[in-house]
Image (cartoon, coloured by chain):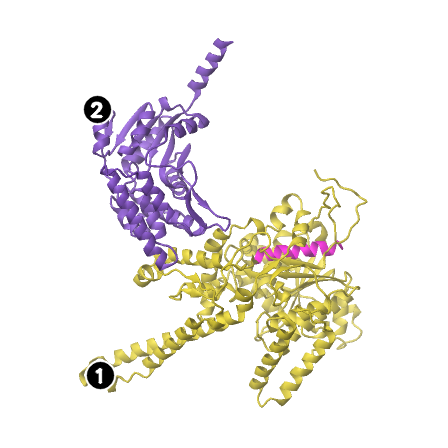
Chain colours: A purple, B yellow
């Protein structure tokens, strides 16, 4: 009986899918998550809301920057603060602007090397999974466009979801589990189990110190355009390192001012 | 699983008492081989209804369209031209191509008449002959201006309905479907039930509709005879009839005359009558094609204002903006007609969205701003791209009558226009400038004066429209109950459910507003507000020439006996 069970377990494990985990912020695109909140709140209907919102978003950005320098601030706090600024905005406005942010800011600035690795992983039989700190409507728009362009299909998405009240206005809270800069190992394991993905047979791509946990959880970690800390760790642990330039590296700075770089220049990504 | 029971009684309530039984309804079966007389075929709803009927219910025997001659064109020419060039029938032209003319001739006849007159403008002989062939009268014709000359409004909206009912009484089917408006509910807020309390006005005042009609006609006649000029007489008629309408709880002449018609035609036992009340009818979703609209309606001035620098819109953000796409309204009319044909109709059908899928004014303003933001982002005009794009509009929650910004903007535009038109370059500029650039500056001044004058005129038009719409966009929050049309739609089965069902609850308002309504208004309605013309569809040379209905020759009593009497 026990032998039979073991056989089943082995068979089940063998049949599990191999995933290819891609972190959006930093790895596929240089823009941090708070830039998306800045873009949305920078286009709030009221000028007062825009000014206060942008101020808050930049404060979140400063927190993020200081935490990267090791100032003892939690980066997850920066993400939470940034999205809290969307409180009171309508679902319509957030979702429409999220779509615009994906089309006007993220898609033009995607790392070509990241896209190449995505296509390659898919071809090699790895199921692509996007992990993002930003909110769901941005990610779904991005996924839709990438799938169309590369002819692939994503197997999953781990990102943040905003909460809305009964009038469809944003409460500013993120639904649990909140996706921070570092992946929560238990949550990722549970999710992979549900999806039938074997982490030890999977690969992951990260670019920041915060991605260390994700990379440590999978069988084939890879550092794509890593920051200094991740580069050091990757070298120590013998993880492959890929360096590649970003498309429009500073596009997100423009976006964080509430102004996109203009979709006209990026016709190939434009969605109907 | 639905169970058919032969003993189930037919009647207005065709749902089973407790077991979820629903008596199936087939629109095509009910209309197969039937002949219908339709009035108002050149109007917004009328055209789409006919387009839908012809497209989705080919089993119909014949549609006879009542039209009046206009601008030197006979009824036959007018209707033929509509099928040849109107965008409302584009789907039929695309489907039947060169064969459309023959296809239509088998199904459509035109009769020259006018709902303002007894027998619908036909002679008594013609009316009797035509009525013998008619299974149901669908009365869509109406004067939709909110403050028209009461003489016209009563003739078309009130007496027109009576004439249509009188004609239906002579017909073989003795059925009348009268298209009214949901806003006959008057100046009330909250749930509006699908019923009519005959002789009770919206504010609860008892009145006799016949006495009311006669009194208002006498008032108009008296004002016309006493006023110093026709213009003054018209002004007085509008003022006094508006006052009378408001005293009974109707906000304007349009709803008053429509309401009066309902009270007059409802409950006349010898003609099976059903009242269909659409709410705010807007751009089509599918028939004739996505986005088609006609004329300037409730949302047009709001959408136009959002595209300007005007930021605070005088609408009540939480109130329901009860919009129904025109082709959905046409489906509703068709469903009510099918029930009417089977004798299973309800007395009143609301065609509205607010009770099942509410859309608010606040949401409409937000979505319009977002749609404009996208459009301006792609504009080549730097002002639109850098300034207007970032000027979102918000509901001001101030009634249009108290909103000073529009009147100030209008006054400013008039002032600037005056400055440009009074600019005397010879007086203000040095002689050498005048000599070198005088002609150029005069030309610029002329152009500017024209542009500012146009802006002032549009602002005045929008201001007056918003004030007229105030009861609907600010003062009252209507929730029209739509139980009857949903019940009728539930009875449909299979493909008919898909193609003819009432599906307002499935409308994704964001998608509809941003991708259907705004582009539709931009293409078909806002040019009219700017004083421009909307082009017809190109001439395809289909050679559509419909035939006129003629009375059977052998029945003619003697030559000349069927002379028309329009004077009645």
Query: In this orientation, which residue lies closer to the viewer: B368 or A176?
Result: A176
Q: In the shown orientation, is residue B536 left or right of residue A267? A: right
Q: Is residue A100 magenta?
A: no
Quarter containing the C terminus of chain B:
bottom right
Decide whether the magenta segment is chiefly helix, strand or loop. helix
Relative to B482, say whether B401 is above or below: below
Q: Chain of mark 2?
A: A
Q: Which residues are magenta?
A: B326-343
| SS label for mark 1 | loop
Quadrant (top left, top right, bottom left, bottom right) of the N terminus of chain B: top right
Q: Choose top left, top right, bottom left or bottom right for residue B411.
A: bottom left
Q: Is residue B196 visible?
A: yes
Residue B222 drawn above or below residue B179:
below
Q: Nearer the viewer, residue B35 or B43?
A: B43
- Whether the magenta-drawn stretch holds residue B328 is answered as yes
Which residue is most to the left? Answer: B432
Outermost residue, front side: A72
Q: Label 1 neighbourhood size at 10 Å, few (<14), some (14-19), many (20+)? A: few
> In the current view of this chain or complex, which residue is farthest to the right?
B7
* Residue B261 vs residue B241, the one in the foreground: B241
Q: Residue B376, image x and y in percent? A: 36, 58
Q: Tell me, yes or no, if residue B102 can be seen here.
A: no
**Res. B369 image quadrant:** bottom left
Pointer 2: what residue? A236
Mark 2: which secondary structure? helix
- Residue A92 in percent (x, y) is at 45, 51
Residue B178 placed where, x, y %?
A: 68, 64
Give the residue pinned by disc 1.
B429
- Quick check: do tags 1 and 2 share a chain? no
């Amino acid at each position: 009986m026990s032998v039979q069970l073991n056989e089943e377990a082995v068979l089940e494990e063998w049949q599990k899918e191999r995933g290819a985990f891609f972190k959006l912020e930093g790895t596929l695109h240089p823009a941090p998550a708070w830039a998306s909140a800045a873009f949305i709140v920078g286009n709030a209907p009221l000028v007062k809301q825009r000014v206060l919102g942008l101020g808050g978003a930049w404060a979140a950005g400063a927190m993020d920057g200081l935490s990267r320098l090791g100032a003892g601030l939690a980066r997850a706090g920066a993400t939470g603060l940034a999205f809290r600024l969307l409180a009171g905005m309508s679902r319509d406005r957030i979702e429409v602007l999220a779509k615009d942010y994906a089309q006007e800011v993220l898609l033009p600035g995607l790392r070509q090397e990241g896209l190449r690795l995505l296509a390659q992983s898919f071809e090699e039989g790895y199921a692509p999974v996007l992990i993002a700190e930003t909110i769901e409507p941005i990610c779904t728009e991005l996924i839709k466009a990438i799938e169309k362009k590369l002819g692939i299909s994503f197997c999953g998405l781990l990102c943040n979801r905003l909460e809305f009240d009964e009038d469809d206005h944003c409460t500013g809270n993120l639904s649990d589990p909140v996706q921070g800069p570092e992946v929560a190992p238990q949550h990722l394991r549970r999710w992979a189990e549900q999806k039938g993905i074997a982490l030890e047979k999977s690969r992951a791509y990260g670019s920041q110190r915060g991605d260390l946990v994700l990379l440590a959880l999978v069988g084939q970690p890879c550092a794509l355009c890593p920051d200094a800390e991740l580069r050091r760790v990757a070298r120590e642990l013998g993880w492959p390192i890929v360096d590649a330039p970003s498309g429009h590296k500073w596009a997100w700075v423009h976006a964080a001012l509430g102004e996109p770089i203009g979709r006209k220049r990026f016709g190939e990504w434009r969605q109907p | 699983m639905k169970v058919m029971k032969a003993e189930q009684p037919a009647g207005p309530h065709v749902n089973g008492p407790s077991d979820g039984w629903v008596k199936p309804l087939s629109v095509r079966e009910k209309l197969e081989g039937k002949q219908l007389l339709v009035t108002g075929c050149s109007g917004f709803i009328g055209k789409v209804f006919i387009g839908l009927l012809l497209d989705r219910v080919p089993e119909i025997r014949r549609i006879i369209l009542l039209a009046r001659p206009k601008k030197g064109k006979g009824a036959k020419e007018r209707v033929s031209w509509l099928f040849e060039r109107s965008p409302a029938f584009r789907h039929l032209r695309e489907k039947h191509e060169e064969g459309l003319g023959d296809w239509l001739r088998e199904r459509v006849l035109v009769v020259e008449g006018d709902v303002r007159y007894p027998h619908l403008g036909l002679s008594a002989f013609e009316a009797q002959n035509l009525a013998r062939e008619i299974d149901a009268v669908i009365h869509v014709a109406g004067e939709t201006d909110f403050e028209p000359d009461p003489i016209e409004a009563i003739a078309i909206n009130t007496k027109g309905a009576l004439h249509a009912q009188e004609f239906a009484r002579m017909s073989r089917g003795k059925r009348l479907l009268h298209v009214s408006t949901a806003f006959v509910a008057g100046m009330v807020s909250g749930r509006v039930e699908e019923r009519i309390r005959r002789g009770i006005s919206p504010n609860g005042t008892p009145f006799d509709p016949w006495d009311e009609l006669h009194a208002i006609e006498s008032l108009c006649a008296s004002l016309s005879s006493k006023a110093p000029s026709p213009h003054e007489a018209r002004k007085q008629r509008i003022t006094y009839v508006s006052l009378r309408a408001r005293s009974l709880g109707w906000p304007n002449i349009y709803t008053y005359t429509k309401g009066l018609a309902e009270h007059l035609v409802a409950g006349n036992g010898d003609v099976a009558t059903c009242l269909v009340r659409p709410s705010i009818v807007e751009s089509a979703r599918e028939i004739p094609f996505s986005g088609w609209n006609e004329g300037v309606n409730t949302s047009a001035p709001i959408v136009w204002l959002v595209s300007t620098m005007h930021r605070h819109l005088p609408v009540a953000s939480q109130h329901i903006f009860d919009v129904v796409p025109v082709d959905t309204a046409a489906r509703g009319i068709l469903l009510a007609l099918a029930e009417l044909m089977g004798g299973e109709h309800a007395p009143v059908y609301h065609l509205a969205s607010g009770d099942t899928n509410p859309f608010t004014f606040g949401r409409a303003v937000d979505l319009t701003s977002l749609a404009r933001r996208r459009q301006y982002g792609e504009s080549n005009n730097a002002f639109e791209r850098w300034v207007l794009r970032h000027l979102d509009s918000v509901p001001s929650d101030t009634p249009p009558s108290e909103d000073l910004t529009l009147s100030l903007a209008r006054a400013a535009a008039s002032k600037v226009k005056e400055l440009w038109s009074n600019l005397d370059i010879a007086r203000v500029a040095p002689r050498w400038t005048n000599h070198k650039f005088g002609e150029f500056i005069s030309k610029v001044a002329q152009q500017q004066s024209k542009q500012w004058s146009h802006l002032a005129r549009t602002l005045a038009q929008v201001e007056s429209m918003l004030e007229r719409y105030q009861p609907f966009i600010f003062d009252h929050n209507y929730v029209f109950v739509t139980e009857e049309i949903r019940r009728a739609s539930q009875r449909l089965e299979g493909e008919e459910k898909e193609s003819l069902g009432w599906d307002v609850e499935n409308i994704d308002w964001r998608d509809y507003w941003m991708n259907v309504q705004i582009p539709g208004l931009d293409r078909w309605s806002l040019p009219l507000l700017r004083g421009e013309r909307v082009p017809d569809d190109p001439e395809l040379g289909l050679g559509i020439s419909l035939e006129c209905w003629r009375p059977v020759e052998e029945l003619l009593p003697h030559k000349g006996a069927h002379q028309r009497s329009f004077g009645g």
